[in-house]
Image (cartoon, rainbow, N blue to C red):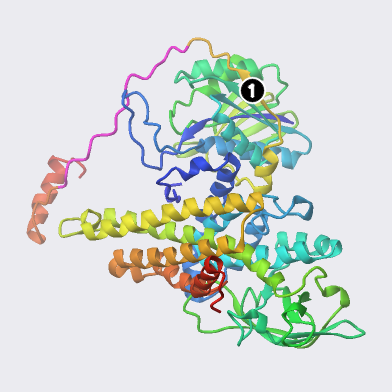
Amino acid sequence: MANSFAGVDFYDADGLLSEEERAVRDTVRAWVDEHLMPVIGDAYIKGEFPRQLIPGMAELGVLGANLPEEYGCAGLNNVAYGLIMQELERGDSGIRSFASVQGALVMYPIYTFGTEEQKKYWLPRLATGKDIGCFGLTEPDYGSNPGGMITTARETKDGWLLNGAKMWITNGSQATVSIIWAKTGAIDDTRSIRGFIVPSTTKGYTAKDQKGKLSLRASDTSEIVLQDCLVPKDAILPKSGGIKSPLMCLTQARYGIAWGGIGAAMACFDEALSYSKNRVMFGKPIGQTQLQQSRLAEMLTEITKAQLLTLQLGRLKDKGTMTPDQVSLAKRNNINMACEAAREARRLLGANGILVEYHSMRHMANLESVYTYEGTHDMHTLILGQAVTGLSAF
Amino acid sequence: MKIAVCIKRVPDMDLRFAIGAGGKALDPAGLKYDIADFDGYAVEVGLRLVEQQGPGEVVVVSVGPTAVQETLRKALGMGADRAIQLSAEDVPFDGMAIARALAAELKDGGYDLVLFGRMATDSANQTVGPMTAHLMGVPCVSAVSKLDIAGGGGTAERQLEGASEKVEFPLPAVVTIDEGVARPRLPSLKGIMAAKKKPLEVKPAQLGEARLTVQSIALPPDRPPGRIVGEGADAVPELVRLLQTEAKVL
């Protein structure tokens, strides 16, 4: 294919991947070229998630791809899973967010905290896209401090009665099922936080789009209200317990986001590089000027560093020794790097850079959300500060 | 139905490439390899025939060094049942040598149909399919854009200049596939995982003597720069004259 994406690989990082990891990456890359790139600009302008892509994504096997085959998933290792996130975000952060939420924030908690019955029922449905999930943790007044949540779950003779509100919920409006986190005990007792599987048809459950987004426009972001929402007793994820449980989910999602940032940055670098060689100003390509070369060299360097750093993170995850602090470092570094790369690419593109037919500004706007969600850049700074000093600044 | 699909591992010519130091081959540095475009169509045709017509087997075959195993596994990931590597350090340019190796493997294999891509996207010789058919002693239909198999035979359509031709043939047969028949599917992620467990047999390739060798390859010369003959309406007569006398396009 003439317009296929070739990636960026200055240090032969490909040589560090297995054949199967490369095959997974190439397959998803080809899928993004063929199915996502032709529609993403329009979806972004219209402010709609391109739902028609869900069956194709499911058939390919990208939803919950690192969960076991016995539940209908692809059973990939974590590096291959990360490469999927990278390639999806090369297309658009909103599409990667969809896959991250479905896999890391809905399927992972069911897999990790659920009963065998819950796993057998939900995981194949979520892997095939029959059900779409969302993750209800963040609340209007509790973003960086999820432990402060005021959503409650009270046990009654008929089941669990949920009350509260969740905000900034990716996939919220199209979700057919939510993982809702709520306190089962006193409002200051973070140990009483438990997860619940809540079908969106449950009485008292409503989700509405958050309007006016200037970022992640091709993604569904919603506010969820739970008003005397009664779910059966077996809706609880029995092995979840305390704020640690949702944070474990976030570690999974952040791991994928770290890879995603590389994808977005590569897309911007690729676009900037090609533009710099074709755009002629003052009688020569702008790529022949020192200022633009400086931009490109900086982008290339940061992308290459992030590739090696993130691959090692993946190897640690596959070995089972990865720590949440290490994920914080990668998420913080890679998304900041991607934000910078997108901004510099947009600038290199001059006036053309503000048009939707080019991709850098869409990535630039998207990445501001990615910079902010799943632990803001600042929160990850404090997590790292705490990790090295042993002293918490938050 | 038992189907063999012969596939070639070729460099992706859409990417930047350079001619190697000896001037007889591409510089391997930075090349990315994949299944040849038309061969991908052939794999898809084979998979669909077995899917639509019930029990059967799709066997993918490739001649070349260990690296072709990656290409074979891609076809296994798409859904082929097993693979055969006919091992050779280099893939000769001489199509007859490759055809000999393939025919030796396929002749007594009980295949109903042997599929090829119309041509390999690197060498573009279009010879290996017909030569293999000849050595196997079976009919060959080349550059097929539509294929139907039923009742021990098949019909194939070929696109000619301004017309299309319909051909009937008995099985077993060799068919080389043109684009437009069936867009190759992507290997699914589960398919990629399953491919590792499917059989991949390695046998020496019985190539025999290769009598054709590449002397040199060269990139096309740079186009001469354009010429501005004038500006506005005044330039039209001169432009017309040059298009008539020099470019000879009017």
Whether residue A320 appears in magenta in the rendering, the answer is no
Q: Which of the pair A107/B99 is nearer the observer?
A: A107
Residue A269 vertical position relative to residue A23 in the rendered view, above or below: below
Q: On what subunit does the disc labeled 1 rest?
A: B
Please name the amino acid that badge 1 sits on. Val
Residue A327 vertical position relative to residue B71 in the rendered view, above or below: below
Residue A394 in which image quadrant:
bottom right
- Specify whether residue A384 is in view: yes
In the image, A292: left or right of B93? left
Q: At 72% from the left edge and 37% from the top edge, which residue is drawn?
A: B50
- Specify whether residue A358 is in view: no
User: Percent x, y for residue A72?
Assistant: 76, 54
User: Percent x, y for residue A121?
Assistant: 82, 63
Q: Which residues are magenta?
A: B210-226
Whether residue B215 appears in magenta in the rendering, the answer is yes
Residue B233 vertical position relative to residue B98 in the rendered view, above or below: below
The residue under label 1 is B202
Q: At 70% from the left edge and 71% from the top edge, which residue is drawn?
A: A244
Q: Which of the pair B119/A20 is nearer the observer?
A: A20
Q: Which of the pair A148/A276 is nearer the observer?
A: A148
Q: Which secondary structure class fits the magenta region best?
A: loop
Q: Secondary structure at mark 1?
A: strand
- Number of residues whose C-alpha sits closer than 10 Å to that of mark 1, classed few (under 14), some (14–19) or many (20 or more): some
Residue B136 vertical position relative to residue A331 in the rendered view, above or below: above
User: Percent x, y for residue B170?
Assistant: 68, 25
| Residue at the far top in the pictured view | B209
| Residue at the far bottom in the pictured view | A227
